[in-house]
Amino acid sequence: MSETITIRVLRYDPDKDAEPRFEDFIVPYRDEWVVLDALAYIKEALDPSLAYRGSCHMAVCGSCGMMINRQPKLACHSFIRDYRGQLVTVEPLDHFPIERDLIVDQDDFIEKLTSLYPYLVTEHDKPLSEGPNLQSPAELAAFRPFTQCINCLLCYAACPQVAINEAFVGPAALAIAHRYNKDSRDSGEELRSEVTDSHHGVWDCTFVGACSEVCPKNVDPAAAIQRTKISASFRWLKERLLPGGTS
Amino acid sequence: MTRRPYVRPLHPHWWLRDRRQFLYILREGTSVFVGLYSAILMDGLIRLAQGRAAWESYLAALSSPLGVTVQVICLAFTIFHAVTWFGVTPKAMPPLLVKGEPIPARTIIRGHFILWAVLSLAVLLVLGG
Ligand code: SF4
Ligand code: FES
């Protein structure tokens, strides 16, 4: 018999299961397969009811985040050859409610992200006739790495603060806020500071650094959050020390 | 089709199950020893203010086997604490640009170690000399 590998999948059917349960599937071993391919094989050949998300197959869409052997990973970026001879355990991302099988409920994240004005906020509409907004390479470099986020939420699954504190806005949302704050065309930092500077914004972060370690796009949310802490502290001081502050 | 999202309870030993989380809790835990040593130093100041006899007994307590053991443990944990924090400092600083290029994280971390060594040597020289 040709080589196989066992994929242990956490299954949950809200219509039938009181709680999630593991199910083992034996799939062919292929050197060039990623875990996402193995899941596709299971769905096509073994159990069409398996639910998971995935699309681009190239670490761009951010939809295939899951726990693979307890580590938050993109299923399209995890070769099964790296797990050769092992049992591969696949679970939905930690710290999110499970919708069905490997699919998690992301509503809470979307709400948090939306509260941060995740787009360019401009003071006034600039007419087209004024031409484009030019940016120097240095201005671009200030925020460029933070534009790479694909909302895969691996960072949320890695973060112990997210685990113990539901209200924490979390790494990716704060990294995206930082991305716009550092953009020379943006003037929404004040608006975002309502959330970023609040207790459940950057101050819930205890600088574990796990988010940056697991990020498949090298976004470095931990850096974004620590830098926002510095700006938040300055804003706090300014409000109290300068005339015209609120208190 | 019903929606009935299932919230998995946090594993009771979540920080023991993962190397990364374990190191984080260890780093946080070491601050207890940093605090303990600060308290010992504060106590020294108080004893010094109380006069010669108090100060001498403080020194004697420090050089007792128990005192030395406590200090060695504090030193070990404080070094671990410092090293872990040096490792993350590049993330806490705004990117420093030299000729338009950000200084690599490794250089910043090394800088901290060098500064640490220089300061420790200076303190040793001043106190020892
Ligand atoms: S910051 Fe990185 S890990 Fe977090 S959602 Fe974005 S790409 Fe994924
Ligand atoms: S399938 Fe798009 S990121 Fe994995």
Image: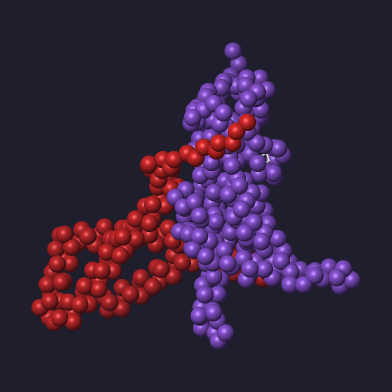
Chain colours: A purple, B red
Image mark count: 0
On the rendered structure, is B37 left or right of A140?
left
Q: Residue at x 62, y 59 (%)?
A: A115
Q: Quadrant of residue B125?
A: bottom left
Residue A63, x across and y down, in percent: 65, 41
Residue placed furthest toward the bottom: A243
Q: Is residue A220 above or below residue A76?
A: below
Q: Residue at x 50, y 80 (%)?
A: A247
- The answer to whether residue B88 of the structure is visible from this angle is no
Residue placed furthest toward the right: A129
Q: Residue at x 67, y 68 (%)?
A: A188
Q: Is residue A67 above or below residue B104?
A: above
On the rendered structure, is A13 left or right of B64?
right
Residue A158, x across and y down, in percent: 51, 47
Residue B47, x across and y down, in percent: 17, 77
- The answer to whether residue A124 of the structure is visible from this angle is yes
Q: Residue at x 45, y 59 (%)?
A: A206
Image quarter in which the N terminus of chain B is found: top right
